[in-house]
């Protein structure tokens, strides 16, 4: 009889593990929750590299490499049109929201800032979205550089 009782907890543990793995497979977003967005990312256009690091209670993204002229020529502020883009913070994501963070994005291509979000999609993909009036949004996926 002792043998029957000894295997019962083992069977329950195996069943619980199988159930947990099944739930993760059925809901990949829960498996990705907590993916660390810090590091070096290549933008979807492959034209820029952004370093994401902790800042305050959230994250900041700073340009570390850009293609083209490398200056902020489209900035609406005349005093900033000649500044170098390398070193410019283009992402501030400080408010937790779902699996990611809400914040703001600066797009040097058009010189405008947008409300936006950053959501890790696994260890090597980061979805970045910018919105106008939180209605018209555009997303892109950045790829982690090793």
Image (spheres, rainbow, N blue to C red):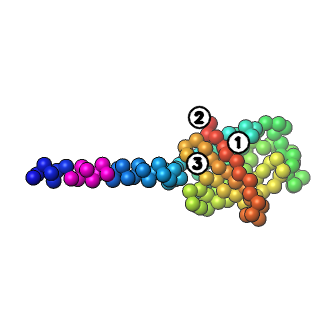
The answer for how far apart the CA atoms under marks 3 and 1 are is: 14 Å
- Residue at image x 83%, y 42%? 71
Alpha carbon separation for disc pair 2 and 3: 16 Å
Query: Label 2: which residue?
Result: 146
Gap in angstroms between the C-alphas marked 1 and 2: 14 Å
Task: Give the structural element (helix, strand or loop) at label 3.
Answer: loop
**Rendered location of residue 115, percent (x, y):** 72, 60
Instruction: Tell me where the magenta segment starts and ends, as one range.
Output: 8-15
Image spot of residue 44 (x, y percent): 71, 42
Q: Which of the two discs, 1 and 2, labels the residue nearer the N terminus?
A: 1
Residue 131 or residue 56, whichever sits in front: 131
Which tag is nearer the camera, tag 2 or tag 3?
A: 3
* Disc number placed over residue 121 in the picture, else none: 3
Residue bearing mark 1:
43
Sequence-wise, the earlier of marks 3 and 1 is 1
User: Toward the viewer: 40 or 21?
Assistant: 21
Q: Which residue is pictured at 66% across the width and 56% down the height?
A: 117
**Which residue is the extreme one toward the left?**
1
Q: Which of 45 and 86 is in front in this view?
A: 45
Local packing at callout 3 (Cα closer than 10 Å; few below 14, some 14-19, many 20+) is: many
Going from N to C along the chain, the mark reached first, 2 or 3, is 3
Q: Position of residue 138 (x, y in %)?
A: 74, 53
Examine the rendered structure and indicate whether residue 79 appears above or below residue 45. below
């Amino acid at each position: 009889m002792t043998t029957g009782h000894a295997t019962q907890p083992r069977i329950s543990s195996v069943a619980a593990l199988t159930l947990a793995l099944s739930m993760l497979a059925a809901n990949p977003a829960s498996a990705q929750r907590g993916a660390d967005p810090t590091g070096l990312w290549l933008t979807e256009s492959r034209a820029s590299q952004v370093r994401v690091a902790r800042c305050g209670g959230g994250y900041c993204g700073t340009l570390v490499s850009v293609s083209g002229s490398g200056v902020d020529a489209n900035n609406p502020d005349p005093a900033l049109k000649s500044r170098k883009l390398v070193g410019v913070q283009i992402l501030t994501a400080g408010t937790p929201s779902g699996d990611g963070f809400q914040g703001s994005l600066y797009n040097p291509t058009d010189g405008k800032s947008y409300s936006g979000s950053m959501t890790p999609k696994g260890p090597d993909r980061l979805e970045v979205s910018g919105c106008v009036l939180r209605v018209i949004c555009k997303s892109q996926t950045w790829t982690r550089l090793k």
